[in-house]
Amino acid sequence: MDRRIKSHPILEFEGEETVTFYFEGTPLRAKPSDTIASALIANGIDIFGWTEKGRARGFFCAIGKCSSCLVVVNGTPNIRACITKVKEGMKVERQIGRGMPLWEEKQ
Amino acid sequence: MKEYRVCIIGGGIIGTSIAFHLAKLGERRVAVFERSYISSGATGRCGGGIRQQWSARMNVRLAMRSVKLFERFEKDAGFDIEYRQGGYLLMAFTEEEAERFERNVKMQREEGLDVEILSPKMVKERYPFINTENLILATFCQTDGHANPHLANFGYAFAARRLGVDIYTHAEVKDIIVQNGSVMGIESSIGSFKCDVVVNAAGAWSKEVGKMAGIDIPTTSYRHQIFVTESLRDFFPFMAISFDGNFYIRQTKHGQMIMGQGDPNEKPGVNRNVTYEFLKSMSEKMTKIFPFLENVRILRQWAGCYNMSPDAQPIVGCSKKVNGFCYAAGFSGHGFMLAPAVGEALAELIIKGSTEHVDISFLDIDRFEKGEVEIEGNVV
Amino acid sequence: MKTKLLIVGGGPAGLSGAIAAAESGVDVLVVDEGLELGGQLVKQTHKFFGHQGFFASKRGVEIAKILKNRIEELGVKYMLQTTLVGFYEDTAVAYSREEDKTYEIDYDYVLLATGASEKFLVFKNNMLPGVYGAGAVQTLMNQYGVLPGEDFLIIGAGNIGLIVAYQIAQAGGNVRAIVEISDKVGGYEVHANKIRRMGIPILLRHTIIKAIGKDRVKGAVIAKVDENFKVIEGTEREIVADTICLAVGLQPSIELASQLGVEMVYIPELGGHVPKRDENMRTSKRNIFVAGDLSGIEEATSAMAEGYIAGYTIAQDITGKDLSEKINKYKEELADLRRGPFGKKVRSGLEKMGIVLPSGGYRTDLQKDFGPAGKLRAVMECHQNIPCNPCEAVCPTNAINMGGNINGIPHINYDKCVGCMMCVMKCPGLAIFMVQEFDEYSVVGIPYEFEPLPNVGDKVILMDRNGEDVGEGVIQRVIKNRKDKTHVVYVAMEKGLERTVRHFRVPSDEEDEIVCRCEEVTKRDVEKAIDMGFTDFEELRRYLRIGMGPCGGRTCRLITMGILARKTGKSMEEISNMNLRPPSIPISFGSILRGEKE
């Protein structure tokens, strides 16, 4: 599903979908100006994760003020999708409940 | 007299792809001459499959490049062509075919293509609506797929026109003017035009157009019939094909099942009538493998021509005998799917003198003189 | 990092404050969380009210650019994607998301312009994906070019709800309804009128009871409420929608003000808890100022005025220069902006802080005169006292006047109006129309901001102020306004309708004339394809799939050829070189298998 606005009476939306990122392993396209949230919604994905109690969670405030849009990015949980820019090769996963922190094993 | 740099004969997918790619490279002094309407020839009559699983390496390369270009078709040409990468299932019903497939897959993988080999059981699990009795094995490539050939043809034509290319329909080229071994122009039903380059993209009529420039294009045209059914729910995302089984089938975006087969007894020539014999043999064969078809109704049947080359591979290049005479012909039933890459390569060859994306030198006509011929086996 | 003035928030208030201070020679650092400067302006595609000094009739996105350019000209430093996380006793700390590191900031003065955040609303299933803040949807649509759904339900008919509904329609979405719990529209009437004349219902005294859906929104249950906002049982009904936008108000973002220890007051008229401050925007602490929505929920125009007042006052403190002239000018502007009926809430809120502002003193009577019939002229449908005057300012013949105060109701002197329609293109409320009566018919010029623009000769359905269909009309002229994009579309209609018709719509497919039943191709589809350049019947057939359905072209073939002949001027003989294909009716595979040869 492509939810990008194709033509608009007032605005022109610049940029091409040149970025590839992965959502749950599936490659998706995004514009360099996209946040993770705008790229996911543009691709028709509304469910960003599930709460601890099993409720579906998604986008809500768009300005990083609520906790609705938390996702796991490259293994790191609790990333606010609405204010984090999408990057080439980024691996985004739905966050289920509380995220598991990521650390490197030290020898 | 109106002047162009390049005059293209044929307004099918090949001619319009070349025109579009020439214009994209900045050459706008281009005209397309179509003696009927856009997509009136083989393009508008084909099955619309887009496949990379070939037996000849060159075809794999061309097809892989084409897939890249189909993926960005809508962006490049501004036209939705109902492109879907639902995969292609190649089905082998004989041991010899199965062995050939295994060899092909090895080569395809060397070329970087992601192909799976599936046992009949795996096929059944994935697609329970297929009767896998007598199936030896199948191969599957997810990035293969299909598109609507009319829309792709219109897409290239409209995009080329937007970039400044003139597209003349109902304009038949009668002769190519060659002086001192060089192309000077063309004569057509709408007048004479000067040009430096003529491209023969005349599909079923490529041999006749070749003669106009004094070049023998070793192609022969054969009728192929095809039909569509009424619309069904979207459940058949891939295209299925078998060479020894002699059929192909897919579902269009609008839900119709479209399918066809080749007829080994077909006589050469441009014949676009249809036969009931074809419907009968298809009905018998297809309901065995796809039992769900039994109660599905057939809506419409038609025919088009394969323009066959001696090795079932396309003949693409520019003549070394007549300066300025280029050709893209003999696609042997798979011109639609190769059109993006061929259009791009030939445009590069004409503008820059060499290709940038896919080396097509092997497809030149002189391979037949040199005897370097590898016959493509994956053709229905 | 060291700065004289630290401004938190790069929206209209913060940037105006930065401009005022930097112009006066103060070293300024702006810290903002967003990806670009401008705050909420970057997603505002509607034209602003006010006067030219405050960019009236410009769209928010353009104002953001103007402010940003000025900031850069003045050499103001700014940090984006950076959040001021704490005002500690020892230092202020900002966190840069992009660099993933913190900065300590040493400052003399602080201007807090942190704005506001959207209020949430409690109803069943309100956490489902698809329930979004209205401002969030605006951000997605207007900043990222993504429309998050197809069918929208808007909760709240304040200005944000009304504006977002209009913008969703501009972006191609369907607004099913606006639900408003009170008995009147909270936003400007001109904004509501834009919505109503498109036929979008504004359901007053209604509320949302629950969102329907398992993993995402599929619809909503709404119901009527009584005077006490209690749901009236038995009035519940379902609305199909995939997106529910909450536009139920804003709350000031007071966290940093609180950390700084300035005195806070609770004033519902200003949006709840706000920092107490004086006329110069100074809080209870000498070096801490506030401006914009943080100091009371209002509009971008007043936010800018407050930003200037704060910026100049701070500059006066730091530099010792006398800037009272500039400060007083903005105070007067601000007083004027708040003088009318829409300023009443803010006036009474500020009064609780001891700030008393004037009210009244502007024209309130409506113009009764519809102008001389037969003359091409503008008619005004601006019936509320809004502080706004671009129509008066743009009129080249001084035919329009507000009666001496920007809050006045505009009147037109029809002896002077020359029918130039500049006021129609300028009016931020799209509340001015053109009319002209002829002997046989009348023409109405309608401000139009949708895509695609209709073509001359198109048949359209005429709509009244409530979005009801009142007849058919024909597009007569389309005046394109490339610069600020409010186009004027002239529609010819039956005489007498010019007083009723205020909008039109292109007939939709449902009621369109079907040419091909199998593939549901409409007459309009055929005409559009011919206009695109498909002038050959066979090409047209392949493009539109006419005749590719089970009927085999029986219903559609001749009609299509007729349309093609009419539009291209070709004769039927020229067109009809058709090629009809077997089987002539659909036959099943099975019937062929069971076939007999003899």
Image: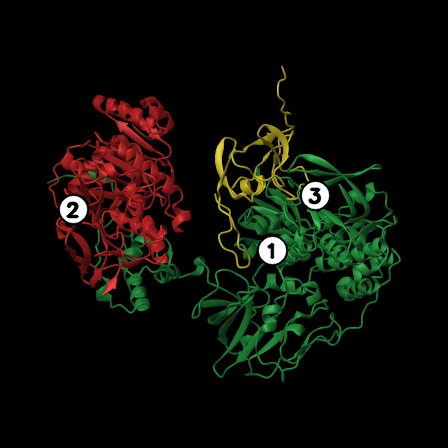
Percent coordinates x, y for residue C589 in the rendering = 24, 39
Crowd tier of the residue under label 2, counting other residues whose Cα lies within 10 Å: few below 14, some 14–19, many 20 or above: few
Residue mark closest to the camera, 3 vs 1: 1
Residue wearing tag 1? C165
Q: Secondary structure at mark 3?
A: loop
Chain letter for mark 1? C
Please indicate whether residue C537 sits to the left or right of residue C384 in the image: left
- Can the viewer see residue C202? yes
**Is B59 positioned to the left or the right of C214 in the image?**
left
Instruction: Give the color of chain B as drawn.
Output: red
- Supply the letter of whichever chain is green: C
Give the quarter of the image for residue C547.
Answer: bottom left
Would you name the residue on which mark 2 appears?
Answer: B321
Tag 2, which secondary structure?
loop
Q: CA distance from mark 1 to mark 2?
A: 67 Å
* Residue under pointer 3: C122
The percent coordinates of residue B273 (x first, y second) are 16, 48
**Would you call the spot at circle 1 few (<14 residues within 10 Å), some (14-19), or many (20 or more)?**
many
Q: Earlier in the sequence, mark 3 or mark 1?
A: 3
Name above or below for residue C122 compared with residue B164.
above
Dot 3 amino acid type: Val
Amino acid at circle 2: Lys
Q: Secondary structure at mark 1?
A: helix
Which part of the image, by quadrant, shows the C terminus of chain B?
A: top left
Could you classify mark 3 by the number of other residues whose Cα lies within 10 Å: few (under 14), some (14-19), or many (20 or more)?
Answer: few
Specify whether C78 is left or right of C444: right
